[in-house]
């Protein structure tokens, strides 16, 4: 029987050790640190049914507007920008028949409550670009969207670009505008 008592004591000591050390080990592992980053995203589109032109979205951050035939001498393009980081928008104008007299930002406003408070005041737009034959900077700005998706109606900044052609475009004019949005620095 002494061997049986020794085994009993050994099992009892093992049970006590498990009862003490396992909870302590589990408690030590109950805290988890998780680090993650969010991809920088900038989405650019044109307000639907807002201009009489062919609008093509390419990859979510590029918009190509094509106007042909009798083109109005003044064109307004309402761009919708959604971003989770700072952004910049560049532009490119291509035409063999029309000349630009002016390119500027006519209006900027938030589309809803999920637009960051400083999205409008933080927007920087350079003055009328002098050389429109190559890509030029349209605007830069801080994070726009506080939530939602790239299709949410209340998380975009609407930037209306004004284009004035000179003097009067020909009846068979063709005019291409390409806008590309790129992300800036990551979310803090």
Image (cartoon, helix red, strand yellow):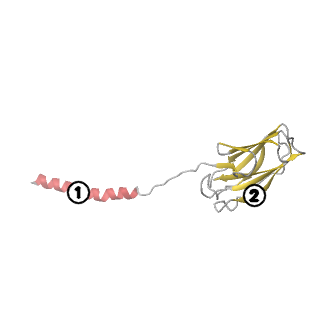
Q: Residues within 10 Å of mark 1 (few under 14, many from 20)?
A: few
Q: For this rendering, which residue is in front, 16 or 115?
A: 115
Q: Position of residue 115 (x, y in %)?
A: 66, 59
The residue drawn where x is 15% and y is 54% is 6
Q: For this rendering, which residue is in front, 136 or 78?
A: 78
Q: Residue furthest top?
A: 96
Q: Which residue is mark 2?
A: 108
Q: Residue furthest right?
A: 167
Q: Are marks 1 and 2 in contact (CB under 8 Å)?
A: no
Vertical placement of 172 versus 161: above or below? above
Q: Is residue 124 left or right of residue 148?
A: right
The residue drawn where x is 66% and y is 50% is 185
Q: How many marks?
A: 2
Q: Is residue 4 left or right of residue 125?
A: left
Q: Is residue 107 left or right of residue 166?
A: left
Task: Say the numbered circle drawn on residue 13.
Answer: 1
Q: Position of residue 179 (x, y in %)?
A: 73, 45
Could you tell me which quadrant the C terminus lies in?
A: bottom right
């Amino acid at each position: 029987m002494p061997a049986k008592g020794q085994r009993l004591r050994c099992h009892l000591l093992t049970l006590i050790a498990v009862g003490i050390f396992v909870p302590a080990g589990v408690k030590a592992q109950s805290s988890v640190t998780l680090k993650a980053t969010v991809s920088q995203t900038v989405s650019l589109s044109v307000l639907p049914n807002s201009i009489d032109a062919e609008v093509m979205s390419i990859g979510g951050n590029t918009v190509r507007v094509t106007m042909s035939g009798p083109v109005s001498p003044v064109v307004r393009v309402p761009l919708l920008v959604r971003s989770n980081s700072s952004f910049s928008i560049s532009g490119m104008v291509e035409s063999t028949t029309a000349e630009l007299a002016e390119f500027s930002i006519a209006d900027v406003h938030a589309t809803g409550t999920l637009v960051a408070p400083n999205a409008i005041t933080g927007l920087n737009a350079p003055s009328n670009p002098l050389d429109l034959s190559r890509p030029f900077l349209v605007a830069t700005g801080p994070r726009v969207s506080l939530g939602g998706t790239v299709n949410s109606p209340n998380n975009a900044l609407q930037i209306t670009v004004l284009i004035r052609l000179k003097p009067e475009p020909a009846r068979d004019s063709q005019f291409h505008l390409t806008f590309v949005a790129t992300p800036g620095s990551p979310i803090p």
